[in-house]
Amino acid sequence: MGWISTVNASGQHNLAPYSQFQNLTWDPPTVMVACNSRADGSLKETATNILETGEFVWNMATYDLREWVVGSSRDWAPSVDEFDALAIPSLPSVHVQPRRVAGSPVQFECRLTQKLLIPGNTPEATAWLLVGQVVGIHIDDAALTANGEIDVLRFKPLARMGYRDYTCVERVFQLNEFTGREAGGIAHLQESVHV
């Protein structure tokens, strides 16, 4: 899930969750978010702000932050700053202008690199697919295990399942067999290959 913070050219901040968020590659780290339109076809503030300024921040949405995540999903008026309206503590970013969610254990500061308008059969089904390069990564020290990995079981990242259903990560397991293609030469994979 992408809990995306943005700011427009006038300094008006926005925070909203998006189900269609995905990591795309790691070198350089690149992510995408898809922003659907409103029923009348107009853009939501997230898409408007990213297209206008070329910047956004992904904030990890966690189980403990779920009420703020859902609260920020309301279709607020463009003049409403969700950080202020919901009393969500924020931190300044280092490389981009949008704020970061202070309670989020991981945040990515991003700059827009590509955009693609995806037509829908209805105005609200039309979406902007916005691709951003990660230019800054913030990880709370408390989010790390003793061996330096993010402790996802502690923070329980959220995912949207559809309807009003959400889930969170409560179980992690490793697989030792890598199937489908040869794993050799892929530096970030640690799985062992069994023949």
Image (cartoon, grey):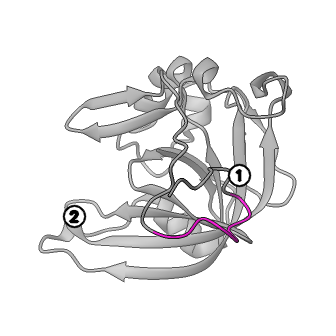
Q: Residue at x 67, y 31 (%)?
A: 104
121 horizontally vs 42: left or right: left
Mark whose residue sits in front, 1 or 2: 1
- The label shown at residue 124 is 2
Which label sits on residue 108? 1
Q: Secondary structure at mark 2?
A: helix
Q: Nearer the viewer, residue 48 or 192?
A: 192
Q: In the rendered structure, which amino acid carries the disc numbered 2?
A: Glu
x, y percentage for residue 153?
Answer: 58, 22
Front-most of residues 100 and 1: 1
- Residue 185 position within the rendered picture, expressed as x and y whole percent measured from the top left: 70, 71
Residue 98 in sight = no
Q: Nearer the viewer, residue 170 or 8?
A: 170
Q: From which residue to which does the magenta span run? A: 181-188
Q: Residues within 10 Å of mark 1 (few under 14, many from 20)?
A: many
- Find residue 92 and report its horizontal and vertical position in percent: 82, 44
Amino acid at the residue labelled 1: Phe
> In this picture, is 185 found above or below 96?
below
Q: Residue 117: where, in percent of width, then height? A: 37, 81
Classify 10 Å Cα crowding around label 2: few (below 14), some (14-19), many (20 and above).
some
Mark 1 vs 2: CB contact within 8 A? no
Q: Which quarter of the figure has residue 166?
A: top left
Residue 54 visible in the picture:
yes
Q: Quadrant of residue 85?
A: top right
